[in-house]
Image: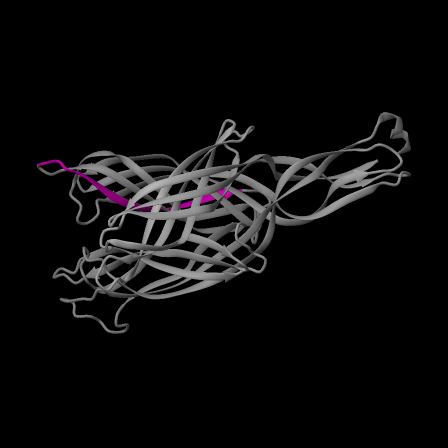
Amino acid sequence: MVLRRERLKLFEVVGERVATVTLRSVQSVPNGKPDVQKILSIVNVTVSATGTPLPNKVVVEGTATVQTIYVAALPEQPVHHMEHTISFLQFVDVPGAQPGMTVIVRPRVTFSDIVIRNPREVEIELIIELFVKVTQLVQLDVVTDVMFKSIPVKVEKNLVRVERVVGENTGQVILSNTLSVPTGKPPVLKILGIISTEVLPSEVRVIPDLVIVQGQIRTQILYVANLPDQPVHQMHQTVNFLVNIRIPGAMPGLMVELFPTVEFAQATIVDPMTIMQDLVLSVFAKVTEIQQMRVVTDVRSDRIPINAVRQLVAIEDVVNEVTQQVNIRQEVTIPQEKPAATKIIRVFSSTVEITRSDILDGKVILEGRLVLQVIYVAALPDQPVHHMHLEVPFTTFVDLPGAFPGMNILVRPRVEFATAQLLPVGVTPPPEVGTRDVLVEAIIEVFVKVTKTVQKHVVIDVLVPEEFRDMN
């Protein structure tokens, strides 16, 4: 008997369960909305949920957003809309689950209702079904072919597309930056601490045996102001980073998954208007390639007893993937707390964030925002240089034949080009007046991949009784 094997990293199914969550919540009519006279209907309920694995169970955290239309208690009885978001927490028993495993949660609303308690309050009732699956990444020697010399056997095979792991590694970088207290913020007397960090990779490049990651880290720092009453203030700081991660076998065109972590963050005072920020950033990168192969799912023979040792695995079958460009051209306004501008110096940072992704039949709807950091000359007597933070929301769709609701989606956006110009374009505003109107133009590249999780029993070994081995 000859066995051919291929070593793959696949997700083994540890367990799956279905749980039900019943939500009853009294909600107020949002401020600015008129009183309720009659509920017409709940037009939409969207649920998002994530799972955290614990020993033999999963903690599911999520939110349900309810969109309702109603008749307002006004003389002309207009129809209005209101939105409420309800959070929930649910424990689901999954024997075998352990911290560090992968959790897939698929919520489904099975019942929704809303009733009036009084003109300013409504009661919402939801029943949500949660399908929870726990998997773990395992390395398996999967049988791809079985051959006997003189015994006829029936070998069943299935064609699968899997992501073969080429390599993975961790890169680390220490960032020490001297930073000024933002304009408009009071001087620093005492730093209380860095209360939040956010890692925003903006560009990932793969060259032979190396992954290069560029991006920014945003920090939020809490401090005591050097003022007579010593109030507590906060400031945001943004620093750039570059990490090189050596992964033998990495090549341009392969896929990269990133898992960044800020392992250490500290800020100290240099002087009342200057701080020193020290960060330790760790980025775990995994390089994969799509591979299509036939794996053995069963082996049988009418001549001898054969025991095909099989294992249930969850395979991420790639349905479709595409790279598409999104063109953005939008007018925005300089924030009111900032002075008007007489000249744009440059866009010194541009990032893109995907805030929502929905799979429809054959396409994916994406919502996101382009975030620009711009420095400009202010319309003030001494013409100081100022900074402004601009956010441009956008919506686009990507055609992906074969995609259906409930499938898994991966989106990787990247800013290819971004610029900001004062309006009207080509006209220099009076230096003493300036302008608050800015035209933002950008090109964003989005890579979208849709997969479906398929459970298959794959053969990992073939056993033949000892008395029949000489017949092989």
> Measured from the top left, where is residue 380 in percent x and y?
14, 61
Establish if 193 lies above or below 37.
above
Q: Nearer the viewer, residue 125 or 51?
A: 125
Q: Main secondary structure of the magenta part?
A: strand
> Measured from the top left, where is residue 407 in percent x and y?
54, 50
Q: Nearer the viewer, residue 112 or 227?
A: 112
The part of the image, by quadrant, that contains residue 40 is: bottom left
Q: Quadrant of the N terminus?
A: top right
Residue found 91% across the figure and 38% down from its top: 150
> Measured from the top left, where is residue 219 in percent x and y?
31, 42
> Measured from the top left, where is residue 251 in percent x and y?
58, 50
Q: Quadrant of the C terminus?
A: top right
The answer, for residue 172, to whether it is visible in the render is: no
Q: Nearer the viewer, residue 226 or 12?
A: 12
Tell me the magenta residue range: 229-246
Q: Tell whether 391 sits left or right of 337.
A: right
Residue found 50% across the figure and 61% down from its top: 398
Establish if 329 lies above or below 365.
below
Q: Tell whether 439 sits left or right of 366.
A: left
View extreme (left): residue: 228
Residue 233 magenta-drawn?
A: yes
Establish if 421 lies above or below 21.
below
The part of the image, by quadrant, that contains residue 458 is: top right
Establish if 286 lies above or below 71.
above
Residue found 90% across the figure and 30% down from its top: 470
Residue 225 magenta-drawn?
A: no
